[in-house]
Structures are given as structure tokens and as C-alpha cells.
Amino acid sequence: MREPRLRTVDKYTPPYPLNRFPSSFPYNLAKEIVFFLATRHEPRLEGEDWEEIFARVIGANWQPSNVGLDDVVLKQCAWGAKTVKANKPSVSKKIRLISGRNSPVYSYGDSEVSGIDPNELGEKILEIWNERVAAVRSKYKHVRTVVLVKSADLLELVVFEHDTVMFDNSLVSWKWNKNNNLVGIAKNGKTLFTWQPHGSQFTIHQSIPNDRLALQIKPPTKLDRDTVLKSIKFDKSWVKVL
């Protein structure tokens, strides 16, 4: 549903429309990635690296969250930042977003999940997610997820956003698959969620929008350690043995 127009409530406008990044965003993101590659021995960019980079590029605050849905904050906007690997990000259509550990044992006190009806268990798993989203949405006007789909060498990237929403379990049916994972399936047969009983990992199956941002980056020359140390005039006087 669209948000209703309210005369008596000041509605906060986000810094930019959903998935319509500022014109400077691609260049500034590429600059961050080039610096990252030039100063690292391995092109291993993890979740917290992406959170920090995204916050810096849009001028927001990076404040890592236990919930993982509001790691980046700019006034009344909050983002959860996710990274996903792909062989060819620019042609990828679907990804799986690891979205937390939803444990019915912890949240509901269930001692054994294997004996619970799949639909009852799935409802509990989805409700844990919905409660997290509701808690964050009570604090911020806009809550989004920003996803970085990355190649192994970080030279091809895709970035997109979507609203972080709660899900209606009445539209989902749950069953165990051949790998003994619980999957949530829409009425049209599309797989929406996967839950692993060992570790309670909850995954959302996400389509990549056509209007995503796709980048290719020229590989930079690696900065030599000795050259860097020499440029900052490092010597023995920097060290005091206690």
C-alpha cells in the first residue's frame, strides 16, 4: 500500500529516492574500492567493510548493530548493508541474503523443532524477523537494505536497495526440502525463504531490480609496504619497547 497523505504529520523525505543513488555515488564508491584494493593484499571485502564504505559514500553514520538492520544511519533513514558474491554480478538476477539467526528454541523456548508442523515452525521463524523489523521501524521513518553484489576480485560490482519490510505468513507455505532445510514458498511456487535448523540461519531470496547500479573498475597497482613506510618516514624512533 502507498503511504497516506497526512496533514498533521511532518513526513521526513529521505536523502534520495529508493534505489536512485546520488550522481556522485558511483564515482565515490569506485574510489573507495580502488583504495581498498590498493591497500589490501587480498580483495576480501566483508560485511563491516561494506557498511563503513557505504556510510562514508552517502555521508551517514556507521554504527554497527546487533540486529543488523540499522548499521548505517542518516537522520531518519537507516540501512542494513549486505554483501553477496557472484561470478558475474552485472548479469545476476537473483541472490540469497543471509538475514540473521532466527531461533525458535531461543525466542519461543521450543526444545525440538523437528517435531513441529512446518507451517507452524515457519510462522515462528518469520515472526522473529518481523519483530526485528518492527523494532527498527519504530525508530526510523525509512528502513532500507543496501546490497553489494561483488565479484571475487571486486572489479565488477552491483549495488541496489530495497525497503526492509515485514512479511505476511498467510501468503507462504512451508516445507522441508531434500537438504533438511525449511523453505518458505509463495503461492506461485517461488521460493522466498530458507531456514537451516543447524545454526538457525534465515535467508531471504531476493530478485535484483533492473535499475540496479552496475560498475566495472580498473585494477589499481598495489601499494608496496616498504614504499608506504618510507613515505611516512617510519623509523625506530616510532617504537618504544615497554
Image: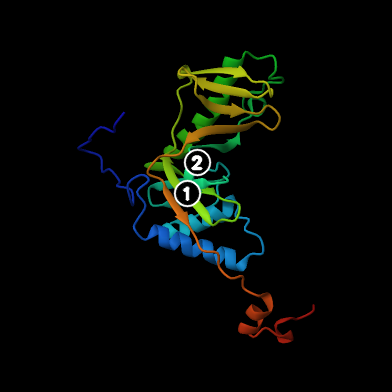
Q: Residue sitting at 33 percent across and 50 percent down?
A: 16
Q: Is residue 242 left or right of residue 177?
A: right
Q: On the image, which quarter does residue 233 sit in?
A: bottom right
Would you say residue 147 is visible in this rendering?
A: no
Q: Which mark is residue 158?
A: 1
Q: Nearer the viewer, residue 39 or 129?
A: 39
Q: Which mark is drawn over residue 92? A: 2
User: Which colour style is shown?
Assistant: rainbow
Q: Nearer the viewer, residue 164 or 133?
A: 164
Report the residue at 38% width, 52% height from top.
Answer: 75
Crowdedness near tag 2: few (<14), some (14–19) or many (≥20) residues, C-alpha within 10 Å: some
The image quadrant that residue 116 belongs to is: top right
Under tag 1, what secondary structure? strand
Query: Where is 69 relative to 193, above or below?
Result: below
Whole-number angstrom distance, CA of label 2 to CA of label 1 = 9 Å
- The front one of 164 and 107 is 164
